[in-house]
Image (tube, coloured by chain):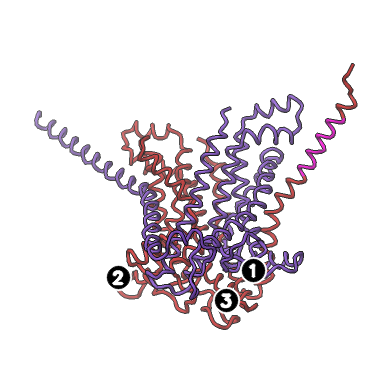
Chain colours: A purple, B red
């Protein structure tokens, strides 16, 4: 009898041990899955740096930063990233001039003025807008927005940065407005009640109480918009002209960093060639730019964070 | 008495007027997005509807615009999506489950979380560069369906992770305590309770992720996908033993957005009609998926009351 009970017990123990190891195995697998996010980041940085290093063996970093021409595809080669950065900043700037005011007003309206039903209907529609493939927006920019703009500005060339910039602006409105609205709705009700009790109108409350209280979130929304606009590819690849052009005038044609990468990738580029390496160098600049804005956003958010 | 009722009333009236003015401005701003969507759809239909017939779906691309179709792009998109789903869904859910149910609060977890957030903000074309360097040349997978599927899987991973975490977080602790009280292990709790109950939220994220992946063009172009494919990849199901073939994984391919981009970058009007028609198909696919996700979210939010 004694032996029998030990047997049962040891059986139970071994079962438990097995269960324990099974649990550990599963936890390990799940951890690996989560860690894949880190692996992807490391891989991105590694690849970009590795291929860029071979690029900078051929191209002096000084030329890359100071030359104002980017003509890698021509016989007379210049390796200045400035035209691509200028193109990127121009389209991003145009996009923000549209998306920031419209997105902010939309967010204020949805959070402070609109009724429950309006919000429930409009938010999904805006989400649908964010779900449209970007190549379709490229079509929109090239064949609908630019011709419409030419109606006002007859001198506008068929490929320009204004049309794509505006379309990118429309694309990022949903990002800006939904993040900003979340921030505004997180402002506690008693702050609004205090404001109304002092006799303020809705608009005064929205602009002077809710907006300042939600600054950190609203700025985060803008930063998200900037990141999206910098990284947007297909709209500019289709409609901006793919001509690296050192100008900040949106009425001219131009190329962004992303459009250049697409342009080169479309050609038959041999592995290890200078063109091949140049898209990694361009990609590195792109990542550094988005990173810069993300860090900036983080700092601003910290600076403006309000405790209620 | 210095207080002037008339003046106060004027002040109030003016304040209210400004409120009304702002309501109008707000509605106009709302309309910018909504109207754009409407104009865009109307334009696509106007330009492309004439090309939408059975031949358009069953023909290969052609040098003659009127005979060109999207068959290879449709098949390519479906197969790429299949790979993407098979890779991203298990990986994303597993990562979300780990972060929400297993992770201890320490610096490793923090690094993972920061990474997931940052990956969501990385421009999609950078994933293309990663895939070009790592999958195409590093691992030698070539410009294949497998490469494209894996690339898009990495791209939508953050979306799935974040939505999985949100869905899991909504499940009250009492459910887990109940399971533990009956002697379940952590994995049994997760497998039999936590994950099944959060299916709605997870599914929403998966659909949104796949809808995004199906419209992504830039990363696929970057890995060097061909733009003119007049054949289909080998069929996944064969007549002979073992009936399943994986040859299609290494096949060259094209996808819907690339087909559209290709037509769009040609100057002839006839090809741009094709682009519009392809755009319609693409928009319908993504809109249906997004609408399904929104519907799912609303439905699950209403139904479950813990």
Q: Residue at x 59, y 67 (%)?
A: A238
> Tag on residue B242?
2
> Cα distance, mark 2 to mark 1?
53 Å
Residue B80 in the image: state x and y as whole percent. Answer: 44, 65
Residue density around tag 1, few if under 14, some if 14–19, many if 20 or more, within 10 Å: many
Q: Chain of mark 2?
A: B
Q: Is residue A90 left or right of residue B195?
A: right
Image marks 2 and 1: residues in contact by CB distance under 8 Å? no
Which residue is more in the foreground, A111 or B233?
Answer: A111
Residue that protrudes farthest toward the bottom in the picture: B64
Residue B203 in the image: state x and y as whole percent. Answer: 48, 50
Q: Residue at x 74, y 24 (%)?
A: A198
**Residue pointed to by mark 1:** A159
Q: Is residue B46 left or right of residue A132?
A: right
Residue A130 in the image: state x and y as whole percent. Answer: 59, 54
Residue density around tag 2, few if under 14, some if 14–19, many if 20 or more, within 10 Å: few
Q: Is residue B187 left or right of residue A123?
A: left
The magenta stretch spans residue B17: yes
Say which quadrant the C terminus of chain A sits in: top right
């Amino acid at each position: 009898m004694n032996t029998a009970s030990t047997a049962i017990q040891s059986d139970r123990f071994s079962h438990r041990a097995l269960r324990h190891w099974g649990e550990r195995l599963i936890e390990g697998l799940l951890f690996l899955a989560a860690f894949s996010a880190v692996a992807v980041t490391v891989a991105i940085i590694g690849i970009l740096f590795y291929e860029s290093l071979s690029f900078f063996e051929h191209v002096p970093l000084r030329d890359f930063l100071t030359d104002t021409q980017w003509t890698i595809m021509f016989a007379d080669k210049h390796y200045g990233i400035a035209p691509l950065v200028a193109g990127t900043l121009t389209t991003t700037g145009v996009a923000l001039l549209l998306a920031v005011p419209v997105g902010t007003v939309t967010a204020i309206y949805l959070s402070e003025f609109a009724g429950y039903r309006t919000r429930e209907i409009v938010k999904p529609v805006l989400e649908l807008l964010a779900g449209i493939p970007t190549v379709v927006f490229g079509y929109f920019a090239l064949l609908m927005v630019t011709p419409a703009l030419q109606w006002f500005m007859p001198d506008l060339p068929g490929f320009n940065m204004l049309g794509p910039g505006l379309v990118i602006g429309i694309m990022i409105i949903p990002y800006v407005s939904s993040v900003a609205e979340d921030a505004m709705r997180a402002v506690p009700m008693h702050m609004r009640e205090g404001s109304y009790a002092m006799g303020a109108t809705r608009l005064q409350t929205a602009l002077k109480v809710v907006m300042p209280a939600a600054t950190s979130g609203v700025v985060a929304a803008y930063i998200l918009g900037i990141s999206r606009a910098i990284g947007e590819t297909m709209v500019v690849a289709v409609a901006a002209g793919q001509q690296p052009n050192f100008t900040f005038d949106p009425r001219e044609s131009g190329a962004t960093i992303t459009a250049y990468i697409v342009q080169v990738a479309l050609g038959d580029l041999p592995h290890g060639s200078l063109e091949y390496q140049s898209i990694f160098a361009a990609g590195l600049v792109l990542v550094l730019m988005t990173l810069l804005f993300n860090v900036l956003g983080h700092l601003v958010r910290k600076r403006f964070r309000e405790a209620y | 008495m210095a207080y002037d009722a008339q003046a106060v009333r004027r002040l109030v009236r003016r304040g209210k007027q400004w409120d009304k003015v702002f309501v109008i401005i707000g509605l106009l701003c709302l309309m910018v997005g909504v109207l754009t969507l409407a104009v865009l759809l109307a334009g696509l239909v106007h330009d492309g509807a004439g090309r939408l017939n059975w031949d358009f779906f069953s023909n290969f691309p052609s040098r003659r615009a009127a005979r060109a179709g999207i068959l290879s792009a449709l098949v390519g998109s479906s197969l790429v999506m299949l790979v993407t789903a098979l890779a991203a869904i298990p990986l994303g859910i597993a990562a979300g489950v780990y972060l929400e149910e297993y992770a201890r609060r320490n610096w490793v977890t923090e690094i993972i979380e920061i990474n997931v957030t940052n990956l969501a903000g990385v421009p999609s074309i950078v994933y293309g560069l990663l895939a070009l360097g790592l999958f195409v040349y590093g691992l030698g997978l070539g410009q294949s369906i497998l490469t494209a599927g894996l690339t898009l899987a990495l791209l939508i991973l953050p979306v799935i992770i974040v939505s999985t975490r949100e869905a899991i977080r909504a499940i009250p602790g009492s459910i887990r305590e109940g399971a533990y009280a009956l002697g379940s292990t952590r994995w049994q709790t997760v497998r039999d309770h936590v994950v099944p109950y959060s299916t709605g939220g997870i599914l929403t994220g998966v659909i949104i992720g796949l809808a995004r992946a199906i419209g992504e063009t830039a990363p696929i172009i970057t890995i060097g996908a061909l733009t003119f494919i007049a054949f289909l990849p080998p069929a996944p199901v064969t007549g002979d033993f073992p009936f399943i073939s994986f040859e299609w994984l290494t096949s060259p391919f094209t996808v819907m957005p690339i087909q559209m981009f290709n037509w769009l970058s040609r100057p002839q009007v006839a090809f741009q009609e094709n682009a519009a028609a392809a755009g319609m198909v693409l928009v319908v696919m993504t809109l249906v998926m997004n609408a399904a996700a929104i519907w799912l979210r609303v439905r699950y939010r209403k139904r479950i009351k813990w």
